[in-house]
Image (tube, rainbow, N blue to C red):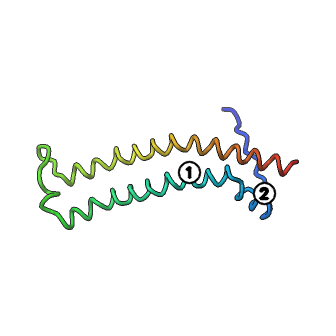
Amino acid sequence: MPVQQVPEHHHITSEQWDELAADPEFRALVRARRVFVVPMMLFVTVFYLALPIAAGFAPGIMSRPVLGSLTAAYLFALAQFPVGWLVLALYLRRSRGYDLTAARCRKHEMEEIRG
């Protein structure tokens, strides 16, 4: 098994961090990630909390058979798996772009530290 190289960590000063945080490309990265992550987090939270809330406030609807002996509550609970996988797949697809942008920002930062 090949030995993995541990990435070299560089500590930056607070002035260098302020400069990086002011970089338009870095700010765009943070903004783009937030625009995706916050709505997804809210959606997932509401979706997962909807089951116990619906079971508590609408037990008649949730106990109604929908598909054979499967009730609406069971189908809703089973739907949480594919929804979780879908959110994961969407984030993985988006995170590739975030990773590339972060790598460019790190490269620029390292060039400035060394330069």
The tag earlier along the polypeptide, 2 or 1, is 2
Kindly check if marks 2 and 1 are in contact, taking CB atoms under 8 A apart as contact: no
Give the percent coordinates (x, y) of residue 49. Answer: 32, 61
The N terminus - image quarter: top right
Residue 3 disc label: none
Residue 38 shown left or right of residue 54 in the figure: right
Residue 56 shown left or right of residue 48 in the figure: left
Q: Quadrant of residue 50?
A: bottom left
Amino acid type of the residue tagged 2 in the rendering:
His
Above or below, 87 against 41 in this view is above
Quick one: label 1, few (<14), some, or many (20+) residues within 10 Å?
some
Residue 4 shown left or right of residue 67 in the figure: right
Q: CA distance from mark 2 to mark 1?
A: 25 Å
Residue 11 disc label: 2
Q: Quadrant of residue 30?
A: bottom right
Amino acid type of the residue tagged 1 in the rendering:
Ala
- Which residue: 55% across, 52% down? 33
Observer-nearest of 12 and 31: 31
Observer-nearest of 87 and 21: 21
Quick one: label 2, few (<14), some, or many (20+) residues within 10 Å?
few
Please identify the residue farthest to the right as the structure is shown.
115
**Which residue position holds label 1?**
32
- Which residue: 40% across, 44% down? 85
Q: Mark 2, mark 1: which one is toward the viewer?
A: 1
Give the percent coordinates (x, y) of residue 108. Answer: 77, 46
